Image: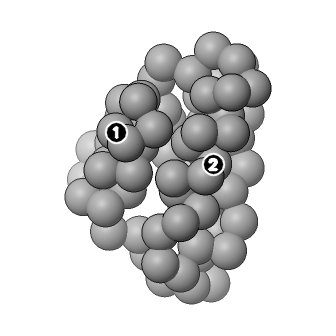
Amino acid sequence: MTSEIFTVSGMTCQHCVASVTEEVAALPGVRQVAIDLPTGSVTVVAERRLDAMALRQAIDEAGYELMVPVGR
C-alpha cells in the first residue's frame, strides 16, 4: 500500500469534496480517499502509486484542478 497527498484547487464545499472523492475512489487500486477542505489536500491510499495522468483526469472530471508537486 502507498499513501500520497495531493492538492486540489477550487473545492469550496462538501459537494466539491463528494465529487472529488467519487472520481478518485473510482481509480483502479484506490482503497481510501480523505479530503481536508480548508487546505485542499487530498490523501489517497492505494495498492500502488497512482498514475499522474489518470489522477489528473479524474480531478478534471470532477470539475477541479490538480496541483501536481514538482517531480511528480
Q: In this view, does 72 lie to the left or right of 23?
A: left
Mark 2 lies on residue: 21
Q: Earlier in the sequence, mark 1 or mark 2?
A: 2
Residue 47 % position (x, y): 57, 84
Q: Is residue 9 left or right of residue 31?
A: left
Classify residue 45 by image quadrant.
Answer: bottom right
Tell me the quadrant of the picture where the C terminus can be found: bottom left
Q: Residues within 10 Å of mark 2 (few under 14, many from 20)?
A: many
Please, is residue 61 above or below residue 9 in the view? below
Q: How crowded is mark 1: few (under 14 residues within 10 Å), some or many (20 or more)?
A: some
Report the disc number at residue 60: 1
Which residue does the image show at 30% across and 50% down from the upper left? 57
Label 1 element class: helix
Which residue does the image show at 68% across and 57% down from the upper left? 33
Which residue does the image show at 34% across and 39% down from the upper left? 60
Tell me the quadrant of the picture where the N terminus can be found: bottom right
Q: Are marks 1 and 2 in contact (CB under 8 Å)?
A: no
